[in-house]
Amino acid sequence: MPTELEEVRFPALCSNAWAVCLTNIPLYFSLSNSFIMETLKSDKLVIATLDKPACENLLGFSIAQPNLFKRHQLLPVRDLKLLPIAKNALTMLINLSADQDVLANLADDDAFLETLFTKVTNVKEPNADDVSMLLANLVKSEKMKKLLTIKRRVPEQVSTSPNVMDQLMDCFVKGAEGALNKNATYDYLSYVFADMSKSKEGRAYFTSRQEYDGVVPVTKLTVFTEHQSSIRRRGVASTIKNVAFDIPFHPTLFSEDEANLLPYILLPIAGPEEFDEEETLTMLPDLQLLPPDKKRDSENSIIVTHLETLLLLTTTREGRNRMREVQVYPIIRECHLNVDDEDVREACDRLVQVLMRDEEGENAGQPGSIQQEHDDQQVVELF
């Protein structure tokens, strides 16, 4: 599983285009300090128009030579922050935010962040998905924990909450497949949630009932584990897994009247295989009599994440017993037999070893094993 968002990649520039880039970089940087900065004060539309060709030419450099943008104490980056109306400027910031100095500069700029929040919650914003991608990169910074406490103007067409995290969650849930903004899917916000849920404070948000709608945030995400977008599925799966590190929350995750998590993470693992009657009768209703064209998740890495979530849910004896009661083992067995992937099979093996072992004489919860599991999962947990 990746530990950071991949760079946005563009087709290689031809030699003529590179020549144009080379001539425009000093021109762009010099203009940034003179005419363009003066124009910005009077007419933002003019500045956007003037910089579009320069931005297009500079795109390749944001990947190939990002250090060029760190000249003069990040002056080019600071200028790009003044042009979030331009898609190409956003794309360059997405690429450049992989650099720790640039990331720190962007994450520390509250005014710039407010511009991003305004754009992503605007249902007519044409670049909302690009803003979502940039936010997904920015939350790699520890400074972005402040998302959990930032309050701002309520975007009435999106949310009724003043909390930024609630607003982003509402964009993600309501905006799937362009339902909120015809220009956006908000899929990359799932990566924001995955990173935010790495911390104890972040997990507290996802496991706490919110005042504005009375809903526990993680329960809004579970319905997307079989969504058509692999980006959305991957981010949601990682968020759920991180939440599963909160052991006191496990009863809520298991409860059919609350999160009811099990069917949502078992269905992506399950295929079209038939089970004998005895196994089927005690399975969860959603897992019984699956159609012959039922497909597992097409991304093996996502299946692994779900298997690791199930393993975390075996931390307590109550969790293990519940998973045995609803016949999780046969589903894992068939996944092991039918998915030709070493990581998937290894994850299946680890889970089966826990589910099939004898409980007699064990201490409920096995704190020593829990800590070791947490240590083993650190890299995978950090989406």
Image (tube, helix red, strand yellow):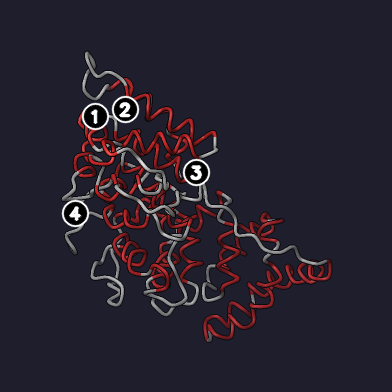
Query: Disc 1 or 4, which lies upstream in sequence?
Result: 4
Distance between the Cα atoms at labels 2 and 4?
31 Å
Q: Residue at x 39, y 67 (%)?
A: 176
Residue receiving disc 1: 316
Residue 280 position in % (x across, y down): 28, 41
Mark 2 vs 3: CB contact within 8 A = no
Mark 3 vs 1: CB contact within 8 A = no
Q: Secondary structure at mark 3?
A: helix
Residue receiving disc 2: 355
Indicate the amino acid at tag 2: Leu
Q: Is residue 233 left or right of residue 288?
A: right
- Nearest the eye: 110 or 250: 250
Residue 252 vs 314, above or below: the answer is: below
Residue receiving disc 4: 209
Classed neighbour count for the residue bearing mark 4: other residues with Cα under 10 Å, few (<14), some (14–19), many (≥20): some
Distance between the Cα atoms at labels 4 and 3?
30 Å
User: From the viewer's perspective, is the residue at label 1 or at label 4 nearer?
Assistant: 1
Residue 178 position in % (x across, y down): 42, 73
- Nearest the eye: 337 or 308: 337
Classed neighbour count for the residue bearing mark 2: other residues with Cα under 10 Å, few (<14), some (14–19), many (≥20): many
Query: Disc 2 or 1, which lies upstream in sequence?
Result: 1
User: From the viewer's perspective, is the residue at label 2 or at label 1 nearer?
Assistant: 2
Query: Disc 4 or 3, which lies upstream in sequence?
Result: 4
